[in-house]
Amino acid sequence: MTAEFTEFIPSLPEEIALVCLTRLNYTAHGVAASVCHRWRELLHSRDFYYHRKRTGFTRKAAVLVQSFPVQSGGEKPVRSPSYGLTIYDPVSGIWDRVDPVPKYPDGLPLFCQVVSCEGKLVVIGGWDPASWEPVRDVFVYEFTTRSWTQRRDMPSSRSFFAAGAVDGVVLVAGGHDESKNALGTAWAYDIRRDEWTELGRMGEERDECEGIVVGSEFWVVSGYGTESQGRFKRSAESFERGTGEWRRVEDAWGVSQCPRSCAGVGENGGFFSWAEFDPVVRVGACGVDMGGWTLVTGSEYQGGPQGFYLVEGKKEGQKGKLVKVEVPEEFCGFVQSGCCVEI
């Protein structure tokens, strides 16, 4: 830690004071930040987040884009489902809702992307839930203050794109524009500077692709071109921030289905589909890798009940089992996508 983080608690050596504040659970950060200006600066700082991460005092949880319960009138729902953010802590077993985005109090933009960056949530793009028009909105949620801020818009509209975060920078690539043309362009968003920077183009256009971060590399898995809608590519492209270049890898995606939300990383570094892992999650599968555990959701058949399971480690190619998770009724809705947040 830098020298600016000193004398946090009077008459207590700075090393001990820092240890005390580091051990605070993230749920207490909001109260602690109101103690004094210096505590607030510390708790909100990027350096303190990475210090807690290095010393093992962050906690990983799954954040899910999940449908709210729909009230029914007779046999048909009275309206289309709306989506919010659910957070699940596998250690405590606690389920909770993230506060709604103020601009969209009745539900998130449809098909928005949600990624985690430096312990914060970033919601990008999607379709306006009322007009179904694509939006370029960017929102950041801070767990310490339990509040959202609207940030600089994406430079252009795109739908069904890949997204991920590497070293404090959010990366987006692919998808399609408002005319349904597949895109090969990519951008980087600096969460601290609130700035977008254009990256080099991928080798080819990739619509309905999936973004996965492996180490320091951002992978854009599969997708399809404008003239080949629905015929998913077996290749993937990897972006390395150090070189600023894309690298194409053939036969990275071994199945002919959409990779969105269901693509996982096996122990050998290859990609696989959670929909093929077990028949009980073969429809609408979604996997959220939390390091030691992966939360997998899905149904056994179209229209079937949503199941929630934990898998220890990365069990592709092994005899890993799905361990059923008991979920409160209000959190049993369909999971459209998700990410891991380290708070």
Image (cartoon, rainbow, N blue to C red):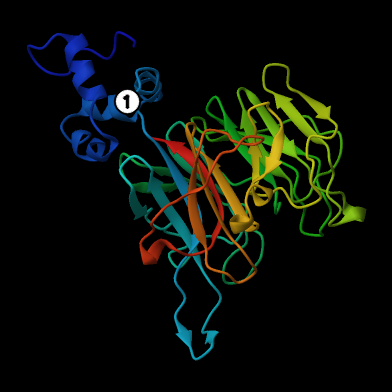
- Work out whether residue 155 can be spotted: no
Q: Judge from the rendering whether residue 75 lies leftward or rightward of residue 234; answer left or right.
A: left
Question: Residue pushed farthest bottom?
Answer: 74
Q: Judge from the rendering whether residue 220 lies leftward or rightward of residue 149; answer left or right.
A: right
**Residue 258: image location, x then y, percent:** 74, 52
Which of the 4 image quadrants contains residue 155?
A: top right
What kind of element bears circle 1?
loop
Q: Judge from the rendering whether residue 69 lies leftward or rightward of residue 187; answer left or right.
A: left
**Residue 282: image location, x then y, percent:** 65, 57
Q: Judge from the rendering whether residue 224 lies leftward or rightward of residue 307; answer left or right.
A: right
Vertical arrangement, residue 71 with respect to residue 265, above or below: below
Badge 1 amino acid? Phe
Q: Residue at x 85, y 32 (%)?
A: 250
Mark 1: give few (<14), some (14-19) or many (20+) Cα within 10 Å. Answer: some
Q: Which residue is mark 1?
A: 57
**Residue 91: image location, x then y, percent:** 34, 39
**Residue 317: image location, x then y, percent:** 67, 35
Q: Quadrant of the C terminus?
A: top left
Between 196 and 104, which is closer to the camera in this rendering?
Answer: 104
- Work out whether residue 275 can be spotted: yes
Between 106 and 208, which is closer to the camera in this rendering?
Answer: 208
